Amino acid sequence: MATTEVRPTEGFTERIDRIEISATLAVVNEAERLRGEGADLVDFGAGEPHFATPKHIKDAAITAIQSNFTKYTAVAGTAELRDAIVQRHAADFDSNYRREEVIASVGGKHALFNAMQVLVDHGDEVIMPVPYWVSFKDIVRYAGGQPVMVETDEARNFALTAEMVERAITSRTKLIILNSPGNPSGAVVSPEDMSEIVRLATRRGIWVLSDECYVYLNFTGRKFSLGSLQEGRERLLVAGSLSKTYAMTGWRLGYALGPAAVIKAMQKLQSQSTSNPTSIVQKAAVAALKGPQQCVEEMRQEYIELRGRVVAGLRAIPGIRCTQPEGAFYAYPNVSAYFGRGGMKSAADVAGRLLREAHVVTVPGEGFGTREHIRISYATSAKELDRGLERMRKFFSAV
């Protein structure tokens, strides 16, 4: 497969020019500029819960500060935290990881970055489904790898199958990235296909990295983690996060579960970058993982209600198509019916005009590998959701 030559910016390294600024960050920056000018925005761009972090988690952080738990810890996290991660995962998914098979990191993205830096070398191919989370492609490229895109079909709800993945495998395939439930589409890969992907990868000596940031926001009734598998464990890494599960996005606590040798290599890398996750946050994370879990289910149920509201509202706008997301908290409507109207030729044009004219923040699909869609986060109140949908309805009716 041909690679695109990257010409380094004068004075900078070649590797920094392999990547682009996150599409979501670009939207945040533009929205902040408009807010600074006094604009009243409805924000469907942010990929984070609208809930407050539960009180018992916040109390644990306050106690940590007051008891002076503010020093360095082990690079991979305290034994207490690593045990809590393992025990929570075992309770929810019937897995059996050991302490040396888990590392705590500064957010789920950090775990993914470390894993790919450890596993992906120059010229390695990495398979990922389209649409993909914005950072997958750039993290792979930063490591020197070559992303190999597997196109999913909107008509089939962006479902990924083992057969589709198998067709993309070559002699240079090093890693397969899975993300279920997925960002931005909310697509869920069936447990059968997930398991079969691990089996075919194991047979061919390929690694599988499962991003399970939204694993607790699965609306299908079939909650599943690849970490529950016994077969193929020697080639499997699971990356998780407390951000979406416990409304802790700003706390920055993620983790990875996998073979001890890979975890040790990730720990070596982390020791030379961030070192340990924040000590105070580690205590809060233990409280989240070991404390009452009712808050997780309550948030999930509200997201299900909001999903119905946003899908119905989008489908009521003439020309817009929207699949039914099966997890996470995003809708991914197809807005291509409006290309050619008012000078709009792409999702980026649509999102730009929605922001500037309707004051509704969305993320264009180009950042996720498609040009016909925009991403809408429905992690907001029902009132704010309705307000934004009405603005969108008026905008599209006028173009």
Image (tube, grey):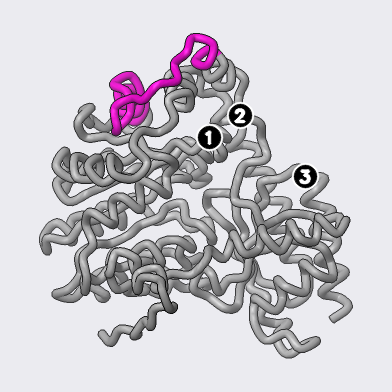
**In percent of the image, x 49 and y 38: which residue is there?**
252
Callout 3: SS? helix
* Distance from Cα at disc 3 to Cα at disc 1: 25 Å
**Residues at circles 2 and 3 in contact by the CB criterion of under 8 Å:** no
Residue 91 visible to the viewer: no
Q: Residues within 10 Å of mark 2 (few under 14, many from 20)?
A: some
Side of 307 relative to 288 (left or right): right
Residue 63 visible to the viewer: yes
**In percent of the image, x 43 and y 19: which residue is there?**
290
Residue named by callout 3: 382
Residue named by callout 1: 251
Side of 189 relative to 186 (left or right): left
Q: Residues within 10 Å of mark 3 (few under 14, many from 20)?
A: some
Q: Earlier in the sequence, mark 2 or mark 1?
A: 2
Amino acid type indicated by mark 1: Trp
Looking at the rendering, the stretch of residues picked out in magenta corresponds to 63-90
Q: Is residue 4 above or below residue 316?
A: below
Side of 75 relative to 58 (left or right): left
**Residues at circles 2 and 1 in contact by the CB criterion of under 8 Å:** yes
- Judge depth for marks 3 and 1 and give the one in front: 1
Q: Quadrant of the C terminus?
A: bottom right
Callout 1: SS? helix
- Which disc number belongs to residue 53? 2
Amino acid type indicated by mark 3: Ala
Q: Is residue 208 above or below residue 264?
A: below
